[in-house]
Amino acid sequence: VRPLLRRLVMGVSDHALGGAWSPLLQEAPRRRMLMGQASCFLEVPSGEGYLQVHAFADPAVEPGALWASVGEGGWSSVPLRPGWTTYHFRIASHGQGGGARIALESRTSEGRAAVGAVSVNEVAALSPGAPYRRAGGLL
């Protein structure tokens, strides 16, 4: 069994995926589409941190929101932008941190699931100042 990582990159270190992901899309950058409520498992830092999602929102689909849930925490959302964007969600781990289920879903502005409208290249659970934190991500 491989240990959980803090950063998952599709096609490179994506051994800890749950359900609702498409097969790997091979064009660069490699990514998987959200086919419903997709999940993965990451090591979450203790204290405050960020969930970073590098995603592509299909410009031909009505923009909605990207929703995320970390562990037993509630859902939060950020508005989607067409094309490639890095999204950040604030997360807080009470205690030592550790393994957590991350759930992601894209939804229309009416709240319906937007299956296949968003594809994801990277999901990471990062501490402030982590070297893999992308600058300019939307909070």
Image: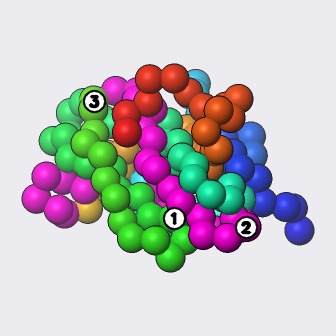
Identify the image's colour scheme: rainbow, by chain, secondary structure or one colour.
rainbow
Residue displayed at 75% across by 46% down: 13
Residue displayed at 44% across by 23% down: 136
Q: In the rendering, at what x and y percent does residue 126 appear?
A: 63, 45
Spot the residue most to the left. Answer: 110
Looking at the image, residue 43 lies above or below residue 62: below
Labels 2, 1: front one: 2
In the picture of the structure, the residue carrying the numbered disc 1 is: 70
Comparing 3 with 76, the one in front is: 76
> What label sits on residue 82 in the rendered view?
3
98 part of magenta stretch: yes
Looking at the image, residue 15 lies above or below residue 88: below
Q: In the rendering, at what x and y percent does residue 56 appear?
A: 40, 34
SS for dot 1: strand
Q: In the rendering, at what x and y percent does residue 90 appear?
A: 46, 50
Distance CA(mark 2)–CA(mark 1): 15 Å
Other-residue count near label 3 (Cα within 10 Å), few / some / many at <14 / 14–19 / ≥20: some
Labels 2, 3: front one: 2
Q: Which residues are magenta?
A: 83-112
Residue displayed at 36% across by 65% down: 75
